[in-house]
Amino acid sequence: MSDLTVNPWKRHGKDRLYVNLPDGTAVAWADRLTKVITVKVEKYRREAVALLREQLGDSATVRPSARRPGPAPAAPSVRPPQQPEPPGHRRDRPVVLPELTVADDLAENRPGAVVLEAIAARGPSSAQRLWSKMLRRASEWDSWYAGLEGERRVGRELQRLSTHGWRVLHGVPKANGGDIDHLLIGPGGVFAINTKHHQGASVWVGDTMAKVNGGQPVPYAAASKAEAAYVQRVLERHCGFAVPVEPALVFVGIVSLHRAATQYTVRIYQEREVSALAPLSGKLTPDQVERIYATARHRRAWLRP
């Protein structure tokens, strides 16, 4: 047996149990309310699950691992040949997902949920953070807190679009690690949204790179385009029809934003400008929006690269 300990954690309206190594590294955690266990380090899966079930009972369920393949998909239904295919229909048979469970439902994610989990598992406590602020000491976690605030602010703006027929998801996982900050799905198509928080900064965005306060170029635009391509592959694999996906960068807290004249492949906004997406239409029917949303909210759809 490893020297694992179970530690309660309550913050931000969450009530959880974390299983930690002696050095404080979290190897698993569980939500007390839903009794869903998430294993972060596979090496300790069996031991961590046993410890958490001692606290939560045998009814606690384990979230499927991203490293383990899910059950074989059921045979998909095939459209009768005499029935006309709708515009944008793909002839590939879609991969059917298993029934959605609470553990796999990404619609439960709040803006910044993934960042918050990382901070909760490995970041400073509230007391440590307060002490650093009092001493005016910079912390390696400052950028994480800034990112969390940025995702929350953009999330609030995106939620306003729901009255225009748009659906939004937050913290969508990528099979190769990391996550997509926000996914917006509606009549105007699908938008993979990456949030960047640079308080008080001046930002320039080119075809592939961006500069913050004239500093070294960072590949914001290139990464955003790659992310959108990934989203399109995943959604089309499971939906069975062409899904238009566009990349978008949303900057939070900046004082000025400049776009290169040649930059037209990535949508660039400040946080309050995302409302410009609301009236877009003509790309997806209401039925297609719901089909894509049902696919995108399923965690298992994103496990395969």
Image (spheres, helix red, strand yellow):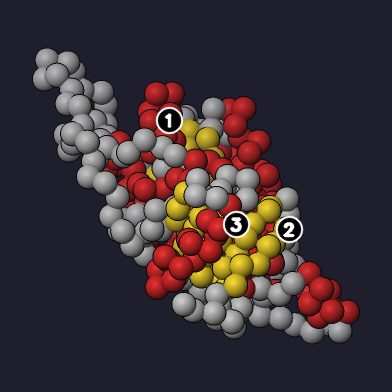
Of residues 46 and 252, the one nearer the viewer is: 46
Please give left or right for residue 240 compared with residue 135 in the image: left
Q: Position of residue 53 (x, y in %)?
A: 53, 56
Dot 3, how many residues are within 10 Å of its Cα: few (below 14), some (14-19), or many (20+)?
A: some
Q: Which circle's residue, 1 or 2, is located before the other in the chain?
A: 2
For label 1, the residue is: 289
Residue at left offset 48%, top offset 33%:
186
Residue 237, picture quadrant = top left
- Name the residue carrying label 3: 55
Q: CA distance from mark 1 to mark 3?
A: 41 Å
Residue annotated with mark 2: 11
Looking at the image, tell me whether mark 1 or mark 3 is earlier in sequence order. 3
| Residue found 60% across the figure and 32% down from its top | 162
Total numbered labels placed on residues in the image: 3
Dividing the picture into quadrants, the one containing residue 10 is bottom right
Q: Nearer the viewer, residue 206 or 273?
A: 273
5 shown above or below 182: below
